[in-house]
Image: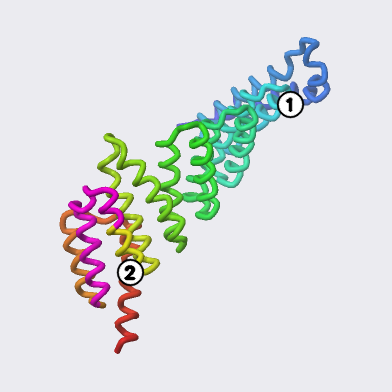
């Protein structure tokens, strides 16, 4: 589809907005004098940005939303400025993830200044996803997921906070921060087991906590499994717990084949998450090395 007409229209709107914006600096100090030029410039930038979105010119759309955001911010219209920066970030996310992070961060600062921590948490999750999937920066993604969890907790949104923390736990475990992951999984597992609606998911959290313990050492895992069964008797009957017991037995005997067969038997019915498979491979490698050392 030929978007040249729309592109030209968007460019014309942007030029008109630039003309009005050029005098905004002098006008901002006289805002109470009734001048409408700043708002007119913002409206034109936003119209141009939406027109650029139609032509999929994401860079220009992002620039126009950003300009509107800066003028709104100078004019004291913080809510509108934050919304503009979010729209700019969404546009840049398609072509320049680093720029998207910069703009969404600006919006987050505005939202926290306004006391809108739930909204700020939502956008920290967006930043975490950009860092994780587009920038391949897991460390920074974890920072954003943790901040989102902290804000949700502060607003008593426990379920949302837990969803963020599960992302933190999964990533830090793969970064060998097993104790931090254990703390999160146990905390969420305990919360879920006391909730009639979430009780069923508690076993998954305790299973993941046990896998992290397993990566620390076998005794840690054995004691953890015993404790989870005492805390949550339903855990004893689940397939995950039975798998853990077989894995512990195979580990104690240094039997790599038994360890592998236990995992295969479990996966003949339910596939393990790639995350769990990664941790089990680490445990299996440890058993294999111990077996070599004993020879």
Q: What's the CA distance linking mark 1 and mark 2?
A: 59 Å
Residue 202 percent location from the top left of the image = 30, 46
Q: Nearer the viewer, residue 172 or 248?
A: 248
201 left or right, relative to 84: left
Q: Quadrant of residue 222?
A: bottom left
* Nearer to us in this view, 258 or 66: 258
Residue ID for mark 1: 74
Which label sits in the foreground, 1 or 2?
A: 2
**Vertically, is 169 above or below 77?**
below
**Residue situated furthest top in the rendering:** 34
Magenta stretch contains residue 212: no
Q: Residue at x 33, y 80 (%)?
A: 290
Seen at 40% across and 36% down, the residue is 159
Task: Name the quadrant containing residue 226.
Answer: bottom left
Q: Which mark is residue 218?
A: 2
Q: Which mark, by number, is residue 89?
A: none
* Helix, strand or loop under label 2: helix
Q: Residues within 10 Å of mark 2 (few under 14, many from 20)?
A: many
Segment colored magenta: 227-253
Q: Residue at x 35, y 74 (%)?
A: 286
Question: Up-down: is 133 above or below 62?
Answer: below
Say whether residue 244 is magenta.
Answer: yes
Q: Earlier in the sequence, mark 1 or mark 2?
A: 1
The crowding category of the residue bearing disc 1, from other C-alpha atoms within 10 Å (few below 14, some 14 to 19, many at least 20), is: some
Q: Position of residue 272 (x, y in %)?
A: 26, 56
């Amino acid at each position: 589809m030929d978007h040249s007409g729309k592109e030209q229209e968007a460019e014309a709107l942007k030029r008109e907005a630039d003309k009005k914006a050029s005098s905004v600096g002098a006008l901002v100090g006289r805002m109470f004098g009734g001048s409408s030029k700043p708002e007119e410039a913002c409206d034109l930038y936003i119209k141009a940005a939406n027109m650029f979105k139609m032509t999929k010119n994401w860079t220009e759309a992002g620039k126009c939303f950003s300009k509107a955001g800066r003028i709104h911010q100078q004019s004291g219209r913080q809510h509108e400025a934050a919304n503009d920066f979010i729209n700019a970030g969404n546009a840049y996310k398609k072509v320049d993830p680093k720029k998207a992070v910069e703009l969404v961060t600006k919006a987050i600062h505005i939202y926290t200044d306004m006391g809108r921590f739930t909204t700020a948490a939502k956008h920290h999750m967006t930043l975490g996803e950009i860092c994780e999937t587009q920038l391949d920066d897991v460390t920074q993604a974890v920072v954003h997921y943790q901040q989102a969890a902290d804000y949700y907790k502060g607003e008593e949104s426990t379920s949302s906070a837990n969803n963020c923390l599960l992302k933190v736990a999964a990533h830090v475990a793969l970064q060998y921060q097993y104790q931090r992951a254990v703390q999160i999984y146990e905390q969420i597992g305990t919360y879920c087991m006391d909730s009639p609606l979430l009780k069923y998911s508690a076993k998954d959290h305790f299973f993941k906590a046990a896998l992290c313990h397993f990566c620390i050492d076998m005794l840690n895992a054995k004691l953890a499994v015993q404790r989870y069964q005492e805390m949550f008797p339903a855990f004893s009957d689940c397939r995950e717990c039975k798998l853990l017991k077989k894995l512990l037995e195979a580990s104690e005997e240094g039997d790599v084949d038994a360890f592998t067969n236990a995992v295969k038997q479990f996966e003949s019915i339910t596939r393990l998450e790639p995350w769990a498979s990664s941790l089990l491979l680490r445990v299996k490698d440890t058993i294999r090395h111990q077996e070599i050392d004993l020879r």
